[in-house]
Amino acid sequence: MSDKKRERVVILENKEIADQIFDMWIQSESIAKLAKAGQFLDLYCEDGSRLLPRPISICEIDGIKNMLRLVFRIAGKGTEEFSRKKAGMYLDVIGPLGNGFPIKKKSACIIGGGIGIPPMLELAKQLDCEKNIVLGYRDKLFLYEEFQKYGKVYAATEDGSFGTKGNVLDAVLEHGIQADIMYACGPLPMLRALKAYAGEKNIECYVSLEERMACGIGACLGCVCKSTKTDTHTNVRNKRICKEGPVFEAGEVNF
Amino acid sequence: MNLNVDLAGISLKNPVMTASGTFGSGEEFSEFVDLNRLGAVVTKGVALVPWEGNPTPRIAETCGGMLNAVGLQNPGIDLFIKRDIPFLKKFDTKIIVNVCGKTAADYCEVVKRLADQPVDFLEINISCPNVKEGGIAFGQNPKQVEQITKEVKKYAAQPVIMKLSPNVTDITEMARAAEAGGADILSLINTLTGMKIDIHKQTFVLANKTGGLSGPAIHPVAVRMVYETARAVKLPIVGMGGIQTSEDAIEMMLAGATAVAVGTANFHNPFVSEEIIDGIEKYLKEQNILDVKELIGAVNEYN
């Protein structure tokens, strides 16, 4: 049967950790036990005028206590509704959705930009190898300290207030970071730059993509990205981000 | 209590089906819904060859609804016959294949290919607002509606459902044209063409600029059109448009629909199609109605 569940989860904690960015822990029945780094949940709104579930990446998994951590930014009315939820309140969710990151034992560079940072935390925790972690921020840091446990952490800020002034690739170059594999999540221009860099240096590269979604489970074909080869399911050069993704080997998709 | 309804002489175990394009070919939703419980599964539109669909973003949420401009992405009839029909055959439900095309010949070719396949009905999509050729181009002119219906009927081995667009001045004109062309059943409504603009980026939210509006926001429009159409033609109607609860489904049947299709609501609640069946059953019990068919067109005049 299904490895996806719909659950009414209890919120254990929800607090703002940076401007408009919220850190929420939820208690699930079985989703946390099934979840992998890089997968996401669909969160439903209570307000019936907002029909579509919001895809939110999983930031941390506690499979033993069956808890999940979601760190999200307010991007509209739906995420604003979630930000107002207090401990003890409920949320309807389905998950885990999508494929997640492949866990390989190679010298890794983990790169997160902006709200693409949260899903990299569980990955950093799970990877058992040499890890360099590069985090890109506009100005204010979040989750930065927590990554320290899992590897050597570098930061870049657009305004230069902390770490390298510029973007994550500027930080990679400044520190001469070497890797056999790169994992990245963040804005499209960042992912494009990293794909090109990884291509030049012949580094294996995985990117996590996002797109406006409707069903979240692969039925509606709303959230596709272009693939370099014909996809076996869609039979065209489109891959479903919610189903075959959100994580893709950079060479298999055009973005 | 009887939940069975008849469409063109074929009995459905209940009047609830899924709306094309919202349910794939059932595989993804089968992780949440017992397909055996549904009156029918209506597949996403399939064309003669694979279609890539429109660029992204294809989806935009609106108040009480959503816009989509998927553009009929589909794997083509060959893979569909090889993979999707055998999947659906594993379940005890009727199979309705939605057919799309760029030309009349395209539609006919797909219909021919389906003639020896174990499908129960064909739904002919002449109402998709998101493609440049075919789709709605066939559905906005009564002469063309009649013509394409006639063409398709020449080759169809299964009963033909013509799916009508609400983006017309008078939907009953199109309904009569489809009836004149030999349609067995009508389904309505497809989505209403809409647009959303991002005021921060000052650009369109959808890459296609326009998309089809669906969801509870359009339900009253759909009820009105089903009511008008039911009074204009003798054909049975599959009513759809914003059905999200059993109350919405019952309303649609009272307006004149023989069966109903649940679409966008599947995105809001993947279990909704089964919940609607349960809700209809509960309503019939409460109302002491022994046969769901008694609801069809049973709305009374206001007095």
Image (cartoon, rainbow, N blue to C red):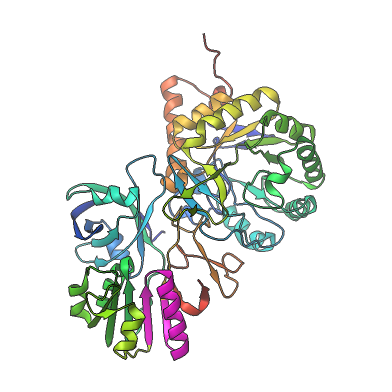
Q: Nearer the viewer, residue A119 or B137?
A: B137
Residue B230: give x, y in percent of width and height: 64, 25
Instruction: State whether residue B8 is above or below residue B70.
Output: above
* Residue shown at 73% from the left, 44% from the top: B138
Residue A127 visible, this angle: no
* Residue shown at 55% from the left, 29% from the top: B223
Q: Is residue B95 left or right of residue A70?
A: right
- The quadrant in which residue A117 appears is bottom left
Residue B71: give x, y in percent of width and height: 61, 54
Residue B194: give x, y in percent of width and height: 55, 43
Q: Which segment is the magenta one?
A: A181-206
Residue B170 visible, this angle: yes
Q: Nearer the viewer, residue A153 or B188?
A: A153
Tell whether position B197 is magenta.
no
* Residue shown at 60% from the left, 72% from the top: A230
Q: Is residue B73 left or right of residue A149?
A: right
Q: Nearer the viewer, residue B122 or A164?
A: A164
Q: Is residue B248 left or right of residue A229?
A: left
